Amino acid sequence: MDQAAIEAIAQSRLQPTLDQINDTAEKKRARDEEIRLDKEEQERQKRTEKQKQKEEKDEQKHIKREFLVIVGHIDEYNLLTASQKKKRPSPRKKRTNAKQPRRPKRKTSASL
């Protein structure tokens, strides 16, 4: 028997095993991909549900605040969000007594 015949026999005996390994690997890759896609879908659904709950909560807050304004329990300034309040300039505290002196500047060791 020559080397080519031996290789042909080995190939014919090993090929079914190699095909089985390839089929098993392909099935595992397909199953892993399906699991990954399922996880992504679940995460997407969780994000959607969380966003929906947040919107509902915001809507309920809005309705409650509108009701309180109508009833007169809070003023419109309390309805502003924190970011809107920051945009409004805060009034400076004015001295109530015009004759009240300003605080003297501190003397530093360099000015002594």
Image (cartoon, rainbow, N blue to C red):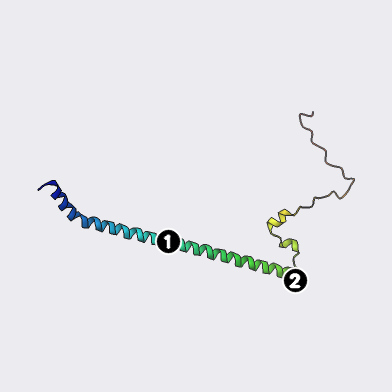
Left or right placement of residue 97 versus residue 8 in this view:
right
Give whichever of 43, 7 is nearer the camera: 7
Residue in the picture at 32% in, 58% down: 26
Task: Tell me, yes or no, whether the two marked residues, 2 and 1, touch with CB atoms within 8 Å.
Answer: no
The amino acid type, in three-letter code, at marker 1 is Leu
- Depth check, mark 2 against mark 1: the one in front is 1
Left or right placement of residue 107 versus residue 8 in this view:
right
Residue in the picture at 61% in, 66% down: 57
The quadrant holding residue 51 is bottom right
Q: Secondary structure at mark 2?
A: helix
Upstream in sequence: badge 2 or badge 1: 1
Relative image position of residue 35 (x, y in whole percent): 40, 61
Give whichever of 5, 59 is nearer the camera: 5
Left or right placement of residue 8 versus residue 70 in this view:
left
Does residue 91 lie above or below 51 as drawn?
above
Disc 1 residue crowd, few under 14, some 14–19, many 20+, Cα 10 Å: few
Q: Secondary structure at mark 1?
A: helix
Give whichever of 87, 11 is nearer the camera: 11
Relative image position of residue 65 (x, y in whole percent): 70, 67
Quadrant assignment for the C terminus: top right
Residue in the picture at 79% in, 52% down: 91
Relative image position of residue 20 (x, y in whole percent): 25, 58
The quadrant holding residue 84 is bottom right
> Residue farthest to the left?
1
Disc 2 residue crowd, few under 14, some 14–19, many 20+, Cα 10 Å: few
Residue located beneath label 2 in the image: 71
Give whichever of 100, 51 is nearer the camera: 51
The amino acid type, in three-letter code, at marker 2 is Val
Residue located beneath label 1 in the image: 37
Q: CA distance from mark 2 to mark 1?
A: 51 Å
